[in-house]
Image: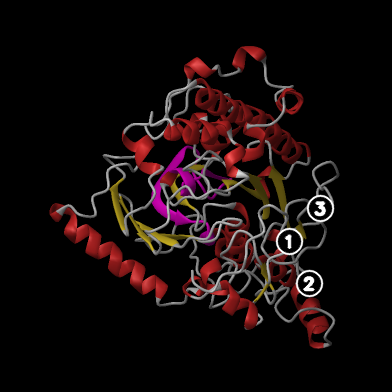
Amino acid sequence: MPVLWILANFLSGLGLLPSHAYTPTKDGNTPADRPNVVFIGAEDLSPDLGCYGNKLVQTQRLDKLAAQGARFERFFTHAPVCAPSRSGLITGQYPTKIGSHHMRSRLLKPPPTFTSLLIQAGYEVHWPGKTDFNFEVPNGAFSSTKPWHTKPAPKQPFFAYVNFQVTHESQIRCSLDAKKRNLSRVPKTALVQPHQVTVPPYYPDVPAVREDIANYLNNISALDIQVGEILDWIDREQIANNTVVVFWGDHGWGMPRGKRWLYDSGLHAPLIVRWPGKIAPGTVREDLVAELDLSATFLALANAPIPKDFDGQLFLPKATKKRDFVFAARDRMDASYDRSRAVRDTRYKYIRNYHPERPWTQPLPYMDEMPTMKALRRLDAQNQLVGPQKLWLAKTKPKDELYDTLTDPHEIQNLAQDPLQATNLHRLQRAMDQWLAQGDWGAFSEAKLVRQGLVADFSGPEPNKPKVLEDH
């Protein structure tokens, strides 16, 4: 038995260390032998990297990272917008179950963060920057919130997070000066031009849309350079062999009908993991992985106990069990109230809309600043939209949506009324009902949640401040 472990347990008995902070791993190693984790986040990013098949972007560093480890083809978030997505990540629980499901709200009594549990397990946790969790950061959530990747490697073992915002929705429609700054290190010969992009069938093929898509793709090339700096830091510190590198996107791209919606364009994100000696280079994973699986797996890497109320499961170095479904939710977006739930298997997606009387595209000031959204609304008013472009701007939406994502990856052919798809519809409806039975605070008005002391009354910036409603 290691001397360090004996000493640590003696100190634990005196109350000077957490009781489970220095438990030996299964092979008898001390925590110093457990892997570091470098967690690299990108905002509003669909799987539009070279390694995922996009030939326009320049993502050599991310492509190399995938070649050195595993690329996950079916990684999905539980919420297609930042704060609910991140609140689930940091707590390991569905936002609908703990009350952090609205965009935005403030949960008053959040559960423990997985990062605090890592600290109790003997890890240093470095989390500079983004803490958009729909609740105030609890005491003890992080060891440090200062930048770490410009300094020598933290004391081992460590968990270090970095968040990149260059792919955020706001950077698609940013000023020319901001655009120049974002792309200053991307070679001009590598920049995607609007005429090169492919326009999804739910958008009109007009210059504003092409410009937005080109901007988004060019921002990904800038992201790749930023990620490369982190990978270079790992190499300089000579810690690559004992460091798990995880690259992820918090949800899909920041374009209309992507971010904020329950289609794959809002839920499907990239996930790349490099773990030398544990994951074979060039691995491609086709199994379903949920964002909540990250939290549980990070604890497992640290040999830390996983709380029973965590909703994820282990997926590294391989999945402990097959995941049959992933689930997701859409609720209030700023001042626009709605409630929809989604369930997906490896092929079929079911969406249940609780307010079919409300349009998909309720006014939302922040989203409406996007040139693509302006073009959609203008052309709709002029009755110039056709097919799925016009459908998405309809004044109402169906109660049920069912899509075959294999034959219809853009999810524009609703099969919910197709008798030939009744079996798939009912199967996914049952799965959703079982998930909702575990708890869904979205079934209650936000005013009730405020009265019960679960969340604070919304205090966001105008003009996005909503009136708390009783009837949604």
State the residue at coordinates (32%, 55%). 398
* Residue type, numbered disc 1: Ala
* Residue type, numbered disc 2: Leu
Q: Indicate the position of residue 46 as horizontal and vertical percent values.
A: 51, 40
Q: In whole angstroms, how far apart are the C-alphas of marks 3 and 2?
A: 20 Å
Observer-nearest residue: 129 or 154?
A: 129
Residue occupied by mark 2: 4
Callout in the foreground (3, 1)? 3
Residue 292 part of the magenta-drawn span? yes
- The relative height of residue 186 versus residue 330 in the rendered view (above or below) is above
- Residue 204 seen in the figure: yes
State the residue at coordinates (43%, 63%). 320
Q: Indicate the position of residue 408 as horizontal and vertical percent values.
A: 29, 40
Residue occupied by mark 1: 32
**Residue 351 in which image quadrant:** bottom left
Marks 1,2: beta carbons within 8 A: yes
Q: Secondary structure at mark 1?
A: helix
- The relative height of residue 112 versus residue 467 in the rendered view (above or below) is below
- Residue 154 numbered mark, or none: 3
- Residue 259 numbered mark, or none: none
